[in-house]
Image (spheres, coloured by chain):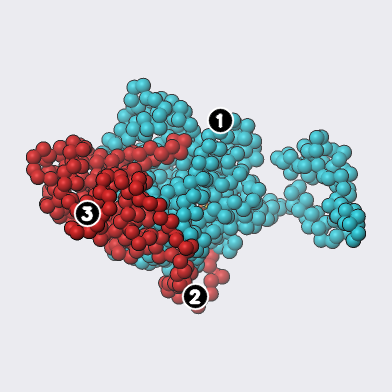
Chain colours: A cyan, B red
């Protein structure tokens, strides 16, 4: 794995999940913003999903299409490349972030332009494209409203779909008032914090850029291998502006986004909007195949990005995370996300999907705490439109995280796990251990909670409030109570 | 080795568990989902669903009268009319100026136009979606993007039930835009605001052939008066499991 993969995907210098979560949970305003937002969107999603009686069948098909696409990924990418090329586009291959950035920077430089407009794209965030372009003297303007908010605030995204979910209206108003002028048209005098007024200010601020800038960079939601058609799903129309008005369009797409056929879109265009924004259909979906004379960009480049995806593909359990369509439903239903927010995950990909995707893309040694950032409650799996078994992958990665730390000296966690395995192996030792635990635990606990555990357990318990062991063991209780019932 | 070969090589190495006998075109996937969630009245459903997005939807036999009314309601003065739009649907000349896209209009001209009037390729009832494919009467994509007002005429026979049928009917090689209501954002406290970058107002006129009974013909009547028909009377219909070869 190249260092560049981890560099932009995982925010270096940010605290590990448990530390960041502790700070986030203590932030009352953040928690209120998050609670309101995730509740609203959860309710909408479940109403709209329930409207389709065959929701489960759609999920089953979507999961099968994605998994089969991954099983023959090489063939589908070659088919896609041929179809896009035949339709007048140019396909590039990037093994890692640095190479993708080099390709995009080179393409922009070749046009002679010094600025680009951007459609919201996880892939370009993952590779740190804006920073790479800036180094080359090229300014990238984010045009999605939430991305604009993040960019103006020199902030980081905290949600896949609504990256500025952590900010409320008055924070956004202040930001527009203070920072818009540095990026172009300033915010109007006396701007209020009414969302409609804020959206209007963004419209005016971005409009002159859409009309002027000659190069656009986008991501892709899907690409059909048989026809070479690329799809971008959006709401605001900023996507259409970028995909339609400039002379040159550069699309950076993770290799896992390919679908075997155009017909497969019938499944995903039903599942994605309902799972994502809780709408029957998002306001705008753009589908384009190569270039069209007299309509839209005459120069189209598709950059196919690996950047850790093939490493993820190698893991037969973990590879299902590559089926993700970035709907963000798993974030909105996750009790951990609702309380900690997206920044705690320290990665471009937050929430349950981030907890399984980030360590795989970046290498588990770069995000060893993320697989533990979950209660394994399973809500994410139930919500996922492509049926990614996130809890299964989490458990699998926890084992890998423990393994990866197992150097010459075993870590506390590894020791505990090993001891636990030995203890659980026979009923006798389990009973004995439970009695020791019950007695010892009582001695250490205050108000029924163990703040710190002794010996090798101290490190583990620092980030957890461990309930004090019960006075007796379950097995003892069972024997006692059931004997009374005459057994 | 080129990056193309590197990436393809890594993929093949990662997929050693896939048997050689399995190829991309022999794999089948279950397709037990319904082909359509629409009921028999696709026009009524389309109007209801499009109105849900706060598009104004009218149903008429007299397209010209409906278009004239819309032009007056929005006081349109300079209107983009793409090549191939039926002349008989346009208001008689007078208070408005027709902007033709031949030679192509500049972005500034489009930006300052007061509106655009188009036809569409298809409409989808269940999702209330217009499908534009840059064909006759629709023009290139920028025409329906920059003006702040879009009036779209849909012939009743262009309305299909659901997404799968629509995708089967469209030509993927054309530049396609699926439009479901005016542009919108929910980025600020998840509160929906209509009209960000695309046209802030979307009006739709459904044109019925003469002699067709239309029920109510007033704007936005669809949502108010259409009885709520349960989408799946009598529970889900059984559809045979389609297994698509691929
Ligand atoms: S893992 Fe599933 S639920 Fe989560 S963002 Fe991806 S597709 Fe959506």
Quick check: do tags 3 and 1 share a chain? no
Nearer mark to the viewer, of 2 and 3: 3
Within the image, what quadrant is residue B121 found in? bottom left
Q: In the image, what residue occupies the spot 91% across and 59% down?
A: A486
Relative to residue A362, is residue A409 drawn left or right? right
Say if residue A136 shows up in the picture. Answer: no
* Label number found at residue B22: 2
Callout 3: chain: B
- Front in this rendered view, residue B51 or B215: B215
Q: Are marks 2 and 1 in contact (CB under 8 Å)?
A: no
Q: Which residue is mark 3?
A: B207
Relative to residue A299, is residue A182 drawn left or right? right
Q: Alpha-carbon distance for marks 2 and 1? A: 53 Å
- Label 1: state its secondary structure: helix
Q: In the image, what residue occupies the spot 15% across and 51% down?
A: B89
Image quarter in which the C terminus of chain A is found: bottom right
Say if residue B77 shows up in the picture. Answer: yes
Callout 2: chain: B
């Amino acid at each position: 794995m190249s260092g560049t993969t981890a560099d932009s995907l995982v925010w270096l210098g940010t605290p590990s999940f448990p530390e960041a979560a502790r700070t986030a949970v203590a932030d009352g305003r953040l928690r209120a913003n998050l609670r309101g937002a995730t509740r609203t969107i959860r309710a909408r999603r479940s109403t709209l999903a329930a409207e389709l009686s065959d929701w489960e069948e759609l999920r089953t098909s979507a999961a099968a299409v994605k998994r089969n696409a991954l099983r023959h990924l090489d063939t589908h990418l070659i088919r896609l490349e041929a179809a896009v090329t035949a339709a007048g586009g140019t396909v590039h291959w990037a093994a890692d972030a640095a190479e993708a950035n080099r390709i995009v920077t080179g393409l922009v430089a070749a046009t002679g332009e010094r600025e680009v407009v951007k459609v919201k794209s996880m892939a370009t965030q993952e590779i740190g494209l804006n920073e790479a372009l800036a180094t080359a003297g090229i300014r990238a303007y984010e045009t999605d409203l939430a991305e604009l908010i993040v960019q103006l605030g020199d902030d980081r995204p905290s949600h896949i779909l609504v990256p500025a979910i952590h900010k409320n209206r008055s924070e956004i108003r202040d930001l527009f008032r203070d920072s818009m002028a540095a990026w172009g048209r300033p915010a109007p005098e006396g701007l209020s914090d009414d969302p409609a007024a804020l959206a209007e200010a963004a419209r005016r601020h971005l409009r002159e850029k859409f009309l002027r800038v000659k190069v656009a960079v986008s991501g892709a939601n899907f690409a059909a291998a048989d026809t070479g058609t690329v799809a971008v799903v959006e709401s605001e129309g900023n996507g259409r502006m970028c995909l339609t008005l400039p002379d040159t369009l550069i699309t950076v797409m993770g290799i896992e986004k390919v679908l075997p056929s155009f017909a497969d879109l019938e499944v995903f265009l039903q599942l994605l909007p309902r799972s994502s924004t809780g709408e029957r259909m998002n306001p705008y979906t753009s589908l384009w195949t190569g270039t069209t004379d007299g309509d839209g960009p005459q120069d189209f480049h598709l950059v196919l990005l690996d950047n850790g995806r093939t490493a993820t593909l190698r893991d037969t359990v973990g590879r299902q995370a590559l089926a993700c369509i970035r709907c963000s439903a798993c974030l909105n239903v996750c009790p951990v996300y609702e309380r900690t927010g997206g920044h705690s995950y320290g990665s471009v990909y937050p929430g349950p999907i981030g907890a399984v995707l980030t360590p795989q893309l970046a290498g588990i040694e770069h995000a060893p705490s993320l697989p533990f950032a979950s209660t394994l409650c399973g809500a994410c799996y139930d919500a996922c439109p492509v049926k990614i078994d996130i809890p299964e992958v989490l458990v699998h990665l926890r084992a890998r995280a423990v393994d990866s730390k197992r150097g010459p000296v075993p870590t506390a966690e590894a020791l505990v796990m090993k001891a636990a395995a030995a203890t659980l192996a026979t009923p006798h030792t389990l009973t004995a251990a439970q009695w020791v635990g019950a007695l010892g635990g009582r001695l250490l606990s205050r108000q029924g909670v163990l703040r710190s555990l002794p010996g090798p357990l101290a490190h583990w318990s620092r980030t957890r409030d461990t309930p004090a062991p019960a006075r007796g063991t379950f097995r003892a209780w069972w024997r006692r109570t059931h004997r009374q019932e005459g057994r | 080795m080129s990056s193309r070969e590197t990436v393809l090589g890594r993929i093949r190495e990662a997929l050693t568990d896939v048997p050689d006998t399995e190829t991309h075109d022999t794999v089948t996937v279950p397709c037990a989902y319904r082909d359509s969630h629409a009921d028999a009245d696709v026009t009524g459903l389309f109007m209801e669903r499009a109105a849900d997005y706060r598009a104004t939807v009218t149903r008429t036999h007299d397209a010209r009268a409906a278009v004239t009314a819309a032009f007056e309601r929005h006081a349109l003065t300079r209107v983009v009319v793409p090549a191939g739009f039926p002349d008989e649907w346009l208001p008689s000349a007078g208070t408005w100026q027709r902007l033709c896209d031949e030679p192509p209009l500049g972005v500034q001209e489009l930006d300052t136009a007061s509106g655009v009037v188009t036809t569409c390729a298809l409409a989808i009832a269940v999702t209330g979606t217009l499908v534009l494919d840059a064909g006759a009467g629709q023009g290139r994509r920028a025409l329906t993007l920059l003006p702040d007002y879009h009036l779209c005429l849909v012939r009743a026979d262009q309305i299909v039930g659901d997404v799968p049928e629509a995708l089967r009917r469209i030509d993927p090689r054309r530049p396609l835009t699926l439009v479901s209501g005016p542009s919108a954002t929910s980025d600020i406290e998840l509160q929906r605001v209509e009209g960000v970058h695309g046209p802030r107002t979307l009006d739709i006129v459904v044109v019925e052939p003469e002699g067709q009974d239309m029920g109510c013909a007033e704007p936005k009547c669809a949502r108010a008066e259409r009885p709520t028909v349960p989408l799946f009377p009598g529970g889900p219909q059984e559809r045979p499991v389609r297994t698509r070869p691929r």
